[in-house]
Image (tube, helix red, strand yellow):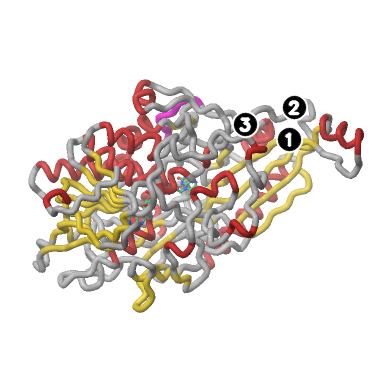
Amino acid sequence: MANLVTSKKKRKYDAIVIGSGATGGWAAKELCDQGLKTLVLERGRDVKHIRDYPTASKAPWDFEYRGTVPLHLRGNHQNLRRLQEQTLHWALDDNEQPFIQEKPFRWFRGYHVGGKSLLWARQTQHWSDFDFEGPSRDGFAIDWPIRYKDLEPWYNHVENFAGIAGNNDNLPELPNSNCQPAFEISCIEEYFKESLKKNYGNRHLINGRCAHLTDPQEIHARQGRAKCMNQTMCNRGCVLGGYFSSNSSTLPWAEKTGNLTLRPHSVVHSIIIKGRNKHKSKAVGVRVIDGLTNEMVEYYAKLIFINASTLNSNAILLNSKSDRFPNGLGNDNELLGKYVSWHNYRGKANAQFDGLKDKKTSGRAPSHGYIPRFRNVFSQETDFLRGYAIGIGGGRGRKFETEVLGDQLRENLLHAPLGNWHISSWMMGEVVPIETNHVRLSPDKTDKYGIPQLIVSCDWTENDDKMVQDYLDQSQEMFEKAGFTDISVRDAHSPPGSDIHEVGGVRMGKDPGTSLLNSWNQMHLCKNVFVTDGACMVSTGTQNPTLTFMTLTARAANYAVEQLKSKNL
Ligand SMILES: Cc1cc2nc3c(=O)[nH]c(=O)nc-3n(C[C@H](O)[C@H](O)[C@H](O)COP(=O)(O)OP(=O)(O)OC[C@H]3O[C@@H](n4cnc5c(N)ncnc54)[C@H](O)[C@@H]3O)c2cc1C
């Protein structure tokens, strides 16, 4: 669908969306639904739903290396979280976009149409007012300009379309979702849930909510999506469209309106600004480097949505320098790129259980158990700020005795006895944003497109270390109280970024002196530019954030269209 036309007139659209991942897909859908001729610019190659999932239906024996990636194929593909033969087609060559780690930082990226919506683990928990009110209550960052009630109808809107499996758990710290039936959790998770209920008043193990169709409705059939069949091969790309991705859902929907133009291989360099007037600067378009020819092309629109994923949206804005904005678009307060944050998954715990011997694991489930944050929710209880949610998984495997040969080996493999139940838990902590955790552009190093490299300067604080220790202590205690054995807890000491959910740098707020975007994700100083991916976040919460990013996007896109129609942009 690449549109390589060169005449200036033909490069004019009503709206431009930068990035085709989880949030860009939503911006495109909403803008196209509202009748705007929309150009989506995507730096990576095109990925068509079903056609471009080369490994989706392969059996284990179809993989030459049985799933592992041998050294000679690893090349520079270090950026996938887990490099596997099944998903190697999504791996990005590190030379595509080198960046500078002023301090160790892992940056996981998906550079193709659909972005990381094809790679994600699809966990989708709501935020609550305990998250939106966190910064003002606990005195960090700035107050969010919105509250839960502002997002509630839009959560509903996004969930209805995307399809979320889960239960209504009636917890104030995790408001109910618009749910289809939940996936089952395993016996050991059920057992642990009961143990938590018995031993603690405020710790609830629930079935993690996730973006899978368990009871598809008409709206999903219209997207061409079908029920999830629990294959758990999601990250290869799902031919059923059983889980939500831009490729299976929002982008083909937008395309069907006839209003979408998708241009892959389009590396956005910067936003073009017109006007030096302090109050009347406007974005008129976008400069793009064609990824195949290296030519610079300009595209023009009345409205621009930046959805390139948190750090890239920061990079594009920082690189959008003009006479009016010498330090980057909208950056009069010099806060652009600052207060970057991420999630802290450093803490891990494992144990065994010598019980439930009459039960075994059967089938597969694409989701798992989830314990919403229980530390410092209703009041401050610990010597660190905020808290952590916990992911929980468990099962019962077989004990394979393989140190024999011949018939005995065959017998052992065919009829291996069941082992103990095992359970594992991982921490999902809130990292409090601070000014020194930031990104900025290198003054002298560029990538192969001539775009300045991003310097990432982020580090853990004492608050994070204390939170990890609390998770380890609490996990030990919760597992002991449940009667688990062989308990091990550990701090993985992984560098920031390892846990993917980076946010901030272009935060929302009421005051243009301390924020970049208003309560509608609209730039305070350039009203026709909206930033609606994780870059807009004031703080991280503990929840997997993408549902909230998509919800903010849908809300902002509808607002932007209203503003455009009322000639306010
Ligand atoms: C292994 C893994 C597991 C995850 N699990 C979860 C989970 O369970 N729950 C959850 O909430 N989140 C999860 N996430 C995070 C989730 O994938 C992201 O939060 C989400 O995809 C962000 O959406 P986005 O639109 O901001 O960015 P992306 O989906 O990354 O899309 C950004 C797009 O912009 C394009 N782009 C970047 N720069 C430019 C440029 N200069 N010009 C043009 N295009 C550009 C990229 O190529 C990409 O296609 C997970 C991520 C990974 C990698």
Camera-side residue: 417 or 222?
Answer: 222
Cβ(mark 3) to ligand 1 < 8 Å?
no
Q: Is residue 542 magenta?
A: no
Q: Is residue 152 left or right of residue 258?
A: right
Q: Is residue 143 visible?
A: no
Q: Is residue 54 visible?
A: yes
Q: Which quarter of the rendering shows the N terminus?
A: top left
Residue at label 3? 364
Report x, y in % for residue 453: 38, 70
Report x, y in % for residue 170: 46, 32
Q: Main secondary structure of the magenta part?
A: loop
Q: Residues in magenta?
A: 175-181
Residue at label 2? 359
Secondary structure type for disc 3: loop
Q: Residue at x 56, y 42 (%)?
A: 371
Q: Amino acid at mark 2?
A: Lys
Foreground: disc 3 or disc 1: 3
Q: Residue at x 58, y 51 (%)?
A: 427
**Sequence-first tag of 2 and 3:** 2
Discs 3, 1 touching: Cβ within 8 Å: no
Q: Is residue 299 left or right of residue 183?
A: left
Q: Amino acid at mark 3?
A: Arg
Residue at label 1? 396
Residue sitting farthest toward the front: 293
Report x, y in % for residue 510: 24, 56
Discs 1, 2 touching: Cβ within 8 Å: yes
Foreground: disc 2 or disc 3: 3
